[in-house]
Image (cartoon, rainbow, N blue to C red):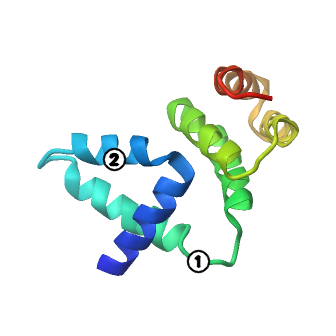
Amino acid sequence: MEDMFETGLAQRKATLGDAYVERTLDAADDFTKPFQEAMTAWCWGFGWGDDAIDAKTRSMMNLAMIGALGKMHEWELHCRGAIKNGVTREEIRAIIHVIGIYCGVPQALECFRAAKNVLDETPA
C-alpha cells in the first residue's frame, strides 16, 4: 500500500499540481486524512499508476465520466489537469458534445460553463 501511495502521490501531483495536492493533504485532519491517503493510493496509484492508458486518455475519460455524474467542482479540477496532460480545447469541446448526447443538453451546458471558467484562465 505504501508503494501505491507514493506512486499515486507522484501521479496526482503531475496531473493536479504540487501546490493543489499539498494544500489538500495539509488541510486533511483526523477525520478526512484516511480518505485522502486511501484515495491517493487507490485512484492515483492503482487507477492512474500503470502505463496501460496514457495520462491524456485517462484525463479525457475522467472528464466524460465526471461530467456524466454532474460533479462540476471535480470536473473543473480535472479539466485543469486534462489541459496539463495535453488535452486540447477542441478535445474538451468534443468531450462535452458526447456528454450532451448521452447525458443531456443541460449537463453539457454545465460542462461548458465549467470549461469556460478553466479555459478563460488558461492561455490558448
Q: Is residue 27 visible?
A: yes
Q: Is residue 117 above or below residue 28?
A: above
Q: Is residue 56 above or below residue 47?
A: above
Q: Is residue 70 visible?
A: no
Q: Quadrant of residue 107?
A: top right
At mark 2, the secondary structure is: helix
What residue is shown with label 2?
A: 22
Asked whether, in this view, residue 89 is left or right of residue 71, the answer is right
Q: Where's the N terminus, which quadrant?
A: bottom left
Q: Quadrant of residue 27?
A: top left
What residue is shown with label 1?
A: 50
At mark 1, the secondary structure is: loop
Q: Quadrant of residue 97?
A: top right
Q: What residue is shown at x 71% (from left), y 46% (from top)? A: 64
Q: Position of residue 67 (x, y in %)?
A: 65, 38
The reply to whether callout 2 and callout 1 are in contact (CB within 8 Å) is no
Asked whether, in this view, residue 70 is left or right of residue 31, the answer is right
Q: Position of residue 74 (x, y in %)?
A: 52, 38
Q: Is residue 14 above or below residue 83?
A: below
Q: Residues within 10 Å of mark 1 (few under 14, many from 20)?
A: few
- The one nearer the camera, 45 or 17, is 17
Q: What residue is shown at x 15% (from left), y 47% (from top)? A: 31
Q: Earlier in the sequence, mark 2 or mark 1?
A: 2
Three-letter code for the amino acid on which mark 2 is drawn: Glu
Q: Position of residue 83 (x, y in %)?
A: 70, 43
Q: Where's the C terminus, which quadrant?
A: top right
Mark 2 or 1, closer to the camera: 2
